[in-house]
């Protein structure tokens, strides 16, 4: 076995006027260093008090031979007072943070989890009271998604507020997309909210920008919403207007797969003979415009020569 290392200790003395020291303590070296740091901190506080013009007692307490003079024992009371003041200031700042009012500008400026936590209490109260407009609610959804701030109670209040706003047509497609993207980012599924979005925008899919439609569809597919397959089909293939040349002419791709959920309301042709697009239709009928050789019966009935360029009936 290796020999045990010697224990290093420090003998502390109290100096008198003659310079002689009376031993007062014997400490291990680590404890001695800790004591030095404590004395240094106390002396620094005394210097700070003196600079600020606060009264400082000239009497000394315990000291070490080469170090600065330490404070008196009653300095502990002053230290406790300072700690109490610091704690009071922290409590006041915390109370100010808790009472911070949520606004559109503050929500748009949220970049961190901690900042979102400061605003969460005020946001929850305003959601519960219905005191936020559509722009503030959409900004709150974006802030929650950016900061990855998951609060089950706050999200429940959000999911209670959003369907009411959708029912009253107070949300645009972009704002509704912000809401479901928020839930997707936080992995929080609420069937009622997704169904409310589908119900609100089912008849207005054609007016939604392609990027917004794709974002809606992606969120619904990834999060596993299966209650509105007709709306998801419309997001992939927006309905055609009755005046469009493609209306009821182009073959329905979902019908070809046997998965069309719109039935008679589908604006595409449910016919396997229908072309996939009008360009293909023109190619399929191109042979009709070319000259063809007629039989005797056809020549007699049409009055043309053996090679006729007239389109066949």
Image: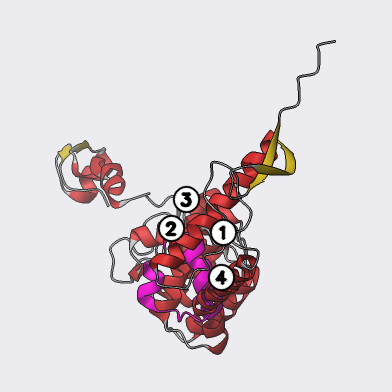
Membership of 104 in magenta stretch: yes
As measured in the structure, the alpha-carbon distance from the residue carrying label 3 to the one carrying label 2 is 31 Å
State the SS at label 2: helix
Tell me the mark number nearer the camera, choosing from 2 and 1: 1
Of the numbered discs 2 and 1, the one sitting upstream in the chain is 1
**Can see residue 88?**
yes
Q: Nearer the viewer, residue 231 or 159?
A: 159
**Can see residue 175?**
no
Q: Nearer the viewer, residue 302 or 28?
A: 28
As measured in the structure, the alpha-carbon distance from the residue carrying label 4 to the one carrying label 2 is 55 Å
Q: Which residues are magenta?
A: 97-123
Mark seen at residue 199: none
Q: Position of residue 20 (x, y in %)?
A: 63, 42
Mark seen at residue 82: 4
Return the residue at label 2: 215
Work out which quarter of the rendered image holds the N terminus and state it.
top right
């Amino acid at each position: 076995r290796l020999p045990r290392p010697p224990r290093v200790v420090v003998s502390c003395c109290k100096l008198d006027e003659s310079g002689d020291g009376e031993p007062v303590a014997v400490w291990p070296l680590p404890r001695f260093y800790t004591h030095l740091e404590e004395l240094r901190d106390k002396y620094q506080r005394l210097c700070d008090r003196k600079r600020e013009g606060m009264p400082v007692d000239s009497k000394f307490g315990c000291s070490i031979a080469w170090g600065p003079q330490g404070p008196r024992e009653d300095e502990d009371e002053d230290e406790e007072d300072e700690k109490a003041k610091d704690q009071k200031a922290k409590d006041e700042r915390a109370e100010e943070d808790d009472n911070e009012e949520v606004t559109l500008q503050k929500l748009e400026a949220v970049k961190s989890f901690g900042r979102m936590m400061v605003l969460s209490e005020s946001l929850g109260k305003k959601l519960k009271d219905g005191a936020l407009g559509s722009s503030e609610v959409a900004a709150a959804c974006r802030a929650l998604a950016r900061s990855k701030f998951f609060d089950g109670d706050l999200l429940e209040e959000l999911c209670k507020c959003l369907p009411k706003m959708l029912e009253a047509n107070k949300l645009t497609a972009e704002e509704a997309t912000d809401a479901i993207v928020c839930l997707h980012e936080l992995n929080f599924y609420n069937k009622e909210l997704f169904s409310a979005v589908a119900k609100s925008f089912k008849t207005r899919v054609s007016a939604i920008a392609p990027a917004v439609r794709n974002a809606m569809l992606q969120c619904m597919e990834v999060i596993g919403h299966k209650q509105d397959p007709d709306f998801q089909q419309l997001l992939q293939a927006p309905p055609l207007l009755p005046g469009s040349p493609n209306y009821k002419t182009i073959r329905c791709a979902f019908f070809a797969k046997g998965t069309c959920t719109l039935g008679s309301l589908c604006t595409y042709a449910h016919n396997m003979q229908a072309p996939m697009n009008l360009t293909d239709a023109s190619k399929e009928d191109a042979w009709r415009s070319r000259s063809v050789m007629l039989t005797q019966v056809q020549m007699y009935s049409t009055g043309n020569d053996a090679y006729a360029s007239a389109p066949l009936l």
